Amino acid sequence: DAKEKGENQVGFFRKELEIEVTKALMLKSDLELAIANKKFVAFYQPYVDKDRKIVGAEALMRWVKNGKIILPMDFIEHLEKTSYIIDAENQLIENVLDDLQSFKRTIPVSINLSSQSLMQRNLRDDLISKLEFHHLPMDLLKIEIVERTFINNFEHISDLIRELKKYGIYFSLDDFGTGFSSLYYLSMLDIETLKIDISFIRGIENSKTRNIINSIIFLAHSLNIKTIAEGVETIEQFEILKSMNCDYFQGYFFHRPMPRDDFGKILGNI
Ligand code: C2E
Ligand code: MG
Ligand code: MG
Ligand code: MG
């Protein structure tokens, strides 16, 4: 009967919940181990200018798990729920700085920082001393942030951006156009670049979307901000974006994210 059926359903959902909880616990202990064993590394995706010359790169976090490479979509959310994200991002920064120090030639590399890392009291001094320790110029490191990382800590983050800029460490606004009040932030944050979200590039065939991209680029330039188009996958997208005067281009059409050794080789050949 109905009551019995209801109870069965409750039993079913409880079972489902148990499975979910077990999975989450397994992942948590996996992540703990990964932190302890320094399993978070950087893959590098170069970005280019209008002549397709490489001018910088983004360091994207990868989890090396039993020799396999795990992408952020499978773990970053879980890390960000805990303070482990701070440790993981610290490992990534150490990796990036070691790599940059070891390459014969270097270009600026940007890292993506979570709100936890951005809210650390000693972040500014920590970054500066890390760069000094590696004998690297400050402007080799850039920081990418997304709206959700500063929405609740606006004052703190805008001060941090201003402070770090004095030292030559510049910020980018990532995934631009997907948030709620991006225009307000644009007027208030002292950022160097704005990354036009991949969703606009994907829709570039559409004339309305093209108009939006055009306006974003015009707006950015009028505020002295450079633009990077994210997720450029075809020559057509590249050509349209160039005609719109976009400054830089990132995407599979040019380079995919790659391990440090491959990136080092590319740098050696620039
Ligand atoms: P994001 O910062 O917007 O990085 C761009 C993402 O787009 C990367 O995915 C990159 O591999 C991908 N991508 C680049 N070109 C193309 C393209 O032409 N087509 C398509 N479809 N995708 C492209 P990835 O590496 O999987 O990273 C996903 C997100 O994970 C990042 O988005 C960023 O939000 C987050 N993430 C990565 N590393 C870190 C980190 O160290 N800390 C934090 N907090 N988040 C990170
Ligand atoms: Mg990014
Ligand atoms: Mg992005
Ligand atoms: Mg993104």
Image: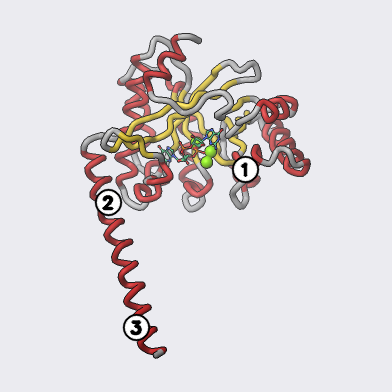
The CA distance from mark 1 to mark 3 is 44 Å
Which label number is shown at residue 28?
Answer: 2
Q: Is residue 12 above or below residue 214?
A: below
At mark 3, the secondary structure is helix
User: Which residue is drawn at the image coordinates 68% and 30% (left, top)?
Assistant: 237
Q: Is residue 238 above or below residue 264?
A: below
- Three-letter amino acid code at the position of disc 3: Glu
Is residue 21 or residue 49 the one in the foreground? 21
The quarter of the displayed image where residue 199 is located: top right
User: Which residue is drawn at the image coordinates 68% and 41% (left, top)?
Assistant: 203
The CA distance from mark 3 to mark 2 is 31 Å
- Three-letter amino acid code at the position of disc 2: Lys
Tell me how many marks there are: 3
Image quarter hosting the N terminus: bottom left
Expressed as whole percent of the image width and height from the top left, the position of residue 72 reads: 41, 41
Q: Tell me the crowding category of disc 2: few under 14, some 14 to 19, or many 20 or more residues within 10 angstroms, Cα based.
A: some
- Three-letter amino acid code at the position of disc 1: Ser
Which label number is shown at residue 7?
Answer: 3
Q: Is residue 155 in view? A: yes
Expressed as whole percent of the image width and height from the top left, the position of residue 164 reads: 46, 31
At mark 1, the secondary structure is helix
Expressed as whole percent of the image width and height from the top left, the position of residue 100 reads: 38, 19
Q: Nearer the viewer, mark 1 or mark 3?
A: 3
Is residue 127 or residue 82 the one in the foreground? 82
Residue assigned mark 1: 199
In contact (CB < 8 Å): disc 3 and disc 2:
no
* Residue at mark 3: C-beta within 8 A of ligand 1: no
At mark 2, the secondary structure is helix
Which label number is shown at residue 42?
Answer: none
